[in-house]
Image: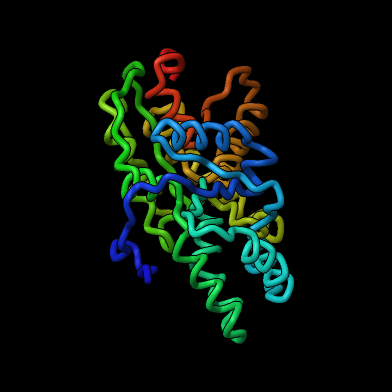
Amino acid sequence: MHSHAPGARQYPAKPADVYLFSTCLVDQFSPQAGLDTVRLLEREGIRVHYLEQQTCCGQPAHSSGYPDEARSVALHQLNLFTEDWPVVVPSGSCGGMMRTHYPHLFAKDPVLHAKALALSGRVYELTEFLVHVVNFHHEDLGAPRSVALHTSCHARRQMGSHETSVALLDSLANVNVEVHARVEECCGFGGTFALLYPDISEAIVTEKVAAIKDTGVGCVVSADCGCLLNITGRAAKQDELAGRKEPSLDGEHIASFLWQRTNPSKAEIA
C-alpha cells in the first residue's frame, strides 16, 4: 500500500493509462490548464481517460462542516474510477481531499473504507506525477524569464507537492524562480473561507500580492487554479482602482506554463 506521508510514497513505473480528474475550477474557469495537462501526459505516451460523469471532489462541503453532503459527493467519485489506473489531479487542493480525506469520510463503512483507501493510493497531484512517475525532462525552449511560484496550502501540507513544483520549474534552464517573502503562506482563498470571511481573505491575499510584486516579477505560476484566481483577481482589482490599463500581475497554471515552454510551437510566447 502507498504511504500517504510526503516523501515516503512508493511510486510505480510510468503507466500506459491514467484517469484525469480535472476539478471544478479547471472545468469552469481554466479549461486550458486541463487541456495542457492532457497534452503533457499524452506527449509521454500515456493515454488519458476523462470521465464526463466526474463531479466535485466534495471539498467545499467537507471544509464547511457538512460531512454527510461531502460523503455523498465523494461516493460518486469512489464508484467512478473503476480501472486500476492512476488518477492525476491538476490541483493539490482537490488531490489532498481525495487522497487524505476520503478514507476518513468512509471510516465507519468497512466496504467503502476499503474502496476509499484503494482510490486514495492511486491519486497523484500533477507535478508529483510528472516528477516521480513520468520523470519529466524536456528542453526549455522559451526566452529567459523570472516568475514567482505559489503553492496551495493543501499541496504544501497534505501532498508535499510544493517540492515537485519547484523541481519542474528548476528544470527549465531559462526560468528563474524568485522566492517571495510569503512563499509558505495561504493566499486567502481557502475555498468557502473567502466567501465566509471576505475581509480576512482580502487582507491575506493583499499581503500575498504585495510580496510577489516586491520580487519584481510580472507572473505567478501555481498548480492550483483557485489560488491563481484569487491572487490575480486581487491584483486586477488593484489595477482597476489605480487606473492601470495593463495587468500588473499575470497568472499561469503550471501545466500550461510547462507546455508552452517545452512545445516548439508555443515556446516563443512563454
182 left or right of 64 in image: left
Q: Relative to 43, does residue 88 appear above or below in the rendering?
A: below
183 left or right of 240 in image: left
In the picture, the quarter occupied by the N terminus is: bottom left
- Total number of numbered labels? 0
Q: Relative to 21, does residue 82 appear above or below in the rendering?
A: below
User: What is the x, y in percent for residue 135?
Assistant: 29, 42
User: What is the x, y in percent for residue 237?
Assistant: 65, 33
Comparing 132 with 198, the one in front is 132
Q: Residue at x 55, y 77 (%)?
A: 104
Comparing 137 with 160, the one in front is 137
User: What is the x, y in percent for residue 158?
Assistant: 44, 63
User: What is the x, y in percent for residue 157?
Assistant: 41, 62
Q: Relative to 204, does residue 113 appear above or below in the rendering?
A: below
13 left or right of 156 in image: left
Q: Relative to 270, does residue 131 appear above or below in the rendering?
A: below
Comparing 250 with 98, the one in front is 98
Which quadrant of the view contains residue 214? top left
Comparing 37 with 191, the one in front is 37
In the picture, the quarter occupied by the C terminus is: top left
Specify how the rendered protein is coloured: rainbow
Which quadrant of the view contains residue 198? bottom right
